[in-house]
Image (tube, helix red, strand yellow):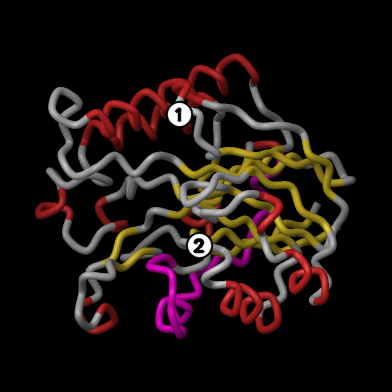
Amino acid sequence: MAFTLATWNINSVRLREPIVCKLLEEEGPDILCLQECKSPVEKIPVEQFRALGYGHMVARGQKGYNGVAILSRLPIEDVGDMDFAGLGHARHVAGRLENGVVIHNFYVPAGGDKPDREVNEKFGQKLDYLTEMRDWFHAERPEKSILVGDLNIAPREDDVWSHKQLLKVVSHTPTEVEHLGETQDAGKWVDITRQDIPEGQLYSWWSYRARDWDAADKGRRLDHIWATPDISNAGHGSRILRGARGWEKPSDHAPVFATFDL
């Protein structure tokens, strides 16, 4: 079974319902994982998505904040969620396809503005969240799994517009990169995007603060698709739909795609 999967921090699924529909119509991924839905599950506009062929959804919602959802053309079974760091946030949901593949959809905390847990509680929460993810993967030893989402860290030097200038900026600090690396290693996760596109600058997020985001191109790769080693060789066709960042009333993130032949 081959399927194409996309992950996208949508920054309010109700506000940006038109561009979610645009993506589903024009790109047609079999599965779309959304983060920062900012909606209770019962208020996610599923009718429009069903009309486009996406009749299945597993989701966790929260009014005004966070929230994750997996929209699918393929049957998918809800297999739960984890509340890492005990934040009480809707930041994870998992679904199992009929072929046994488990998809984990994550929205890791952004971490606030200052990379110092002594003065910024949110940064500490981010590090604690990643530590508990790491420990869970050590214990669970995931197999036949795909992990996607806004992990809010750009780990490589070529995942940001300026490694030197962002070393002390939340999302690219050495501490965060180390925590993400330990989390990835704990599950032996393979970065599918970089497996396919091993070299060169690659971004999935551009700040709303930039007057002309496209020309300035001060981006970061915060959105990821990983897979366990037993299925990582089945992943291919990775791409980032940069153009979506320029759609009407856009998210500040662009969708990331990969195809799996399983």
Q: Establish if 208 lies above or below 62.
A: below
Nearest-to-viewer mark from 1 and 2 = 2
Nearest the eye: 212 or 226: 212
Q: Position of residue 98 (x, y in %)?
A: 89, 46
Nearest the eye: 88 or 254: 88
Residue at the extreme top of the image, as rendered: 139
Determine which quarter of the picture holds residue 112.
top left
User: Residue at 21% across / 36% down in the picture?
Assistant: 174
Q: Position of residue 26 (x, y in %)?
A: 66, 84
**Considering only order in the chain, which callout, 2 or 1, is on the residue closer to the N terminus?**
2
User: Residue at 69% across / 53% down in the picture?
Assistant: 70
Amino acid type shown at disc 1: Thr
Q: How many marks?
A: 2
Q: Is residue 248 magenta?
A: yes
Check disc 1 and report its element: helix, strand or loop. Answer: helix
Which contiguous range is marked in magenta? 231-253
Q: Position of residue 251 (x, y in %)?
A: 43, 69
Looking at the image, residue 70 sits to the left or right of residue 64; the answer is right
User: Residue at 84% across / 62% down in the picture?
Assistant: 55
Q: Position of residue 180 (x, y in %)?
A: 38, 34
For label 2, the residue is 12
Q: Establish if 124 lies above or below 96.
A: above
**Are circles 1 and 2 on residues that touch, CB within 8 Å?**
no
Check disc 2 and report its element: helix, strand or loop. Answer: loop
User: Residue at 37% across / 57% down in the picture?
Assistant: 221
The alpha-carbon separation of the residues under discs 1 and 2 comes to: 27 Å
Packing grade of label 1 (10 A; few <14, some 14-19, many >=20) is many
Looking at the image, residue 41 sits to the left or right of residue 148; the answer is right
For label 1, the residue is 183
Amino acid type shown at disc 2: Ser
Q: Establish if 136 lies above or below 80.
A: above
Q: Is residue 10 magenta?
A: no
